[in-house]
Amino acid sequence: MFKQLTLIAAVAGAVSLTGCVVANPNTVSAYDAQRMSTVIDATVLSVRPVTLQGRDTGVGTISGAVIGGIAGSNVGGPRTGGIVGIAGAVVGGLIGNAVERDATQQQAVEILLQLKNGDRRQVVQGIGTDAFAAGDPVILVTTGGRTRVMRAPPVTTGSTAPNAYPTAYPAPAQQ
């Protein structure tokens, strides 16, 4: 019986932690591939660390309740096994929920930005490889309603522009 309980606890624990994927701003969703994004130039005004609240999908609660119920029912005797099993399920569910929320919580940054037109925006994103500071030029890339902040690539103007780009588009032919 102890082996079965250990196996159930291990499986339930693994299932409850499947949501522990940290969203990195350098990782793009496969859904966003081959979709046009809007890019806006901005300047960083301030950056502060924040903690993103963990998810509460219910998997941790259910896993904890199952484990607690099985463990509790095995502790009590024939008369009290049911009562202790119910109490174990309640306590296990509470513990499982707390474990899931703590395991899926992540560190992030809140970036306050000023756009070229003077408007201000705020973006919260997971911590990536780029560290931003006040005054940094950045771009806001928006795809499918989600925006991420990236370092601005160098701007090429005048004679440094690639030869493949026309200097001006031809005027439409008049009929």
Image: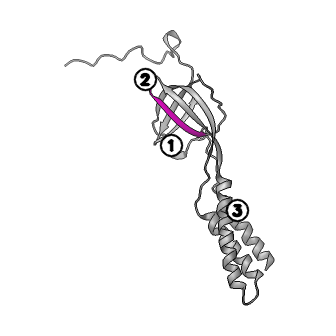
Where in the figure is residue 86, as x and y percent of width and height? Answer: 66, 78
Give the magenta-colored segment's residue range.
119-125
Asked if disc 3 and disc 1 are in contact, CB closer than 8 Å, the reply is no
Q: Earlier in the sequence, mark 2 or mark 3?
A: 3
Task: Identify residue type, mark 1.
Answer: Asp
Residue 170 lies left or right of residue 26; in this view the side is left
Distance of label 3 from label 1 (alpha carbons): 29 Å
Q: Is residue 141 above or below residue 22?
A: above
User: Which residue corresponds to the image point at 56% horizontal and 26% vertical from the top-left?
Assistant: 45
Residue 6 lies left or right of residue 166; in this view the side is right
Q: Is 1 inside the magenta-drawn segment? A: no
Where in the figure is residue 87, as x and y percent of width and height? Answer: 68, 76
- Front in this rendered view, residue 146 or 94: 94
Distance of label 2 from label 1 (alpha carbons): 27 Å
Residue at the disc numbered 3: 14
Q: Quadrant of the N terminus?
A: bottom right
Q: Earlier in the sequence, mark 2 or mark 1?
A: 1
- Front in this rendered view, residue 63 or 8: 63
User: Which residue corresponds to the image point at 70% horizontal and 73% vertical from the top-left?
Assistant: 68
Q: Is residue 3 above or below residue 172?
A: below
Residue 150 in which image quadrant: top right
- Front in this rendered view, residue 173 or 65: 65
Residue at the disc numbered 2: 117
Q: Which mark is residue 32?
A: 1
**Main secondary structure found in the magenta portion:** strand
Q: Is residue 86 above or below residue 123?
A: below
Which type of secondary structure does the marked residue at label 2 adopt? loop
Task: Identify residue type, mark 3.
Answer: Ala
Residue 52 lies left or right of residue 10; in this view the side is left
Q: Earlier in the sequence, mark 3 or mark 1?
A: 3
